[in-house]
């Protein structure tokens, strides 16, 4: 009777160790518990405690097998990592050696080495074209002026106030070009010959007023420009020639 009680106790302990070992099989504790479960299950079977002892024996054996496989897997992964590190170290060493060889080759003049092509010189026209890109003509207001005989205005007048922004390092004395006016849909309303005959210093912004066109009510283009509000208009100035104060004339 006493042997049976001991056998039951060993069987319970073996089963508990086997089950807990399976749960913790990914840790060293799980492997140890499975081994203990196996050692407890064997004497429990000898004492005729078959039920729980068998359960402890089976779970412990399964746990030991799984733990062994996990150890082998970890060892395999470690070996792969070691190989990867070795390959990386070898590749870095090869790269460093190649860099040294390249440095040596660069420092050693070659008899067949092709000389670098000479830089193309910028022409005077290209230089002044760069200056022209920094010169802008901007219309900032539109006025419809009525007839006023006192100031010599004998017909209605569409006045376009504008400014010349000269951000170039060169002063200008005149610009010949065309002012194109578009509606908000970018449909052309009118194209006006627009010449500026006044000096504008370098880095200067100069405002101009009292320039525009006499309004002809019988022309559709004039009617559109007259009736359209300034905020709905788009102005684009196309320069045909810029005369610089130093005497250079840039033609487009």
Image: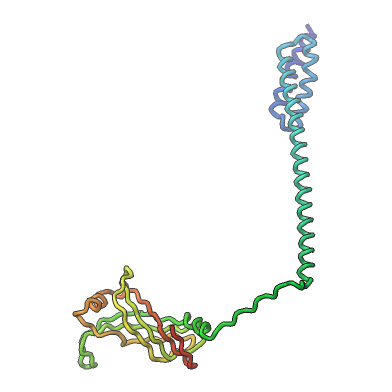
Q: How is the image coloured?
A: rainbow
Nearer to the camera, 41 or 72 = 72
Judged left or right of residue 104, residue 194 is left
Return the residue found at the far top.
Answer: 1
Q: Residue 17 occupies which quadrant of the picture?
A: top right
| Label tally | 0
Q: Quadrant of the N terminus?
A: top right
Nearer to the camera, 49 or 113 = 113
Name the spot of residue 105 as percent of width and height, x first: 78, 67
Name the spot of residue 249 as percent of width and height, x first: 46, 89
Judged left or right of residue 242, residue 60 is right
Name the spot of residue 210 as percent of width and height, x first: 31, 87
The relative height of residue 224 versus residue 202 in the rendered view (above or below) is above
Nearer to the camera, 183 or 148 = 183
Residue at 23% x, 90% y: name it. 153
The relative height of residue 234 versus residue 152 in the rendered view (above or below) is above
Residue at 72% x, 32% y: name it. 26
Q: Residue 235 occupies which quadrant of the picture?
A: bottom left
Residue at 21% x, 87% y: name it. 155
Judged left or right of residue 131, residue 237 is left
Return the residue found at the far front.
Answer: 112
The relative height of residue 173 versus residue 215 in the rendered view (above or below) is below
Name the spot of residue 149 as percent of width and height, x first: 20, 92
Judged left or right of residue 56, residue 122 is left
Q: Quadrant of the C terminus?
A: bottom left
């Amino acid at each position: 009777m006493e042997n049976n009680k001991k056998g039951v106790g060993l069987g319970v302990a073996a089963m508990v160790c086997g089950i807990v070992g399976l749960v913790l099989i990914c840790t060293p504790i799980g492997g140890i518990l499975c081994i203990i479960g196996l050692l407890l299950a064997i004497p429990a079977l000898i004492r005729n405690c078959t039920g729980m002892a068998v359960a402890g024996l089976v779970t412990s054996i399964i746990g030991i097998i799984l733990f062994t496989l996990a150890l082998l897997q970890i060892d395999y992964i470690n070996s792969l990592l070691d190989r990867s590190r070795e390959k990386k170290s070898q590749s870095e060493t090869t790269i460093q050696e190649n860099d040294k060889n390249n440095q040596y080759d660069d420092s050693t003049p070659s008899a067949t080495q092709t000389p670098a092509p000479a830089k193309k010189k910028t022409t005077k026209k290209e230089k002044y074209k760069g200056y022209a890109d920094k010169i802008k003509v901007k219309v900032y207001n539109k006025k419809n002026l009525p007839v006023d005989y006192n100031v010599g205005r004998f017909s209605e007048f569409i006045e376009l106030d504008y400014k010349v922004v000269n951000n170039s390092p060169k002063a200008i004395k005149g610009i010949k070009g065309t002012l194109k006016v578009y509606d908000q849909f970018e449909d052309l309303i009118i194209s006006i010959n627009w010449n500026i005959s006044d000096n504008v210093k370098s880095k200067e912004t100069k405002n101009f007023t009292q320039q525009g066109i006499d309004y002809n009510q019988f022309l559709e283009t004039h009617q559109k420009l007259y009736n359209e509000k300034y905020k709905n208009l788009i102005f684009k100035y196309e320069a045909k020639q810029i005369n610089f104060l130093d005497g250079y004339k840039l033609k487009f």
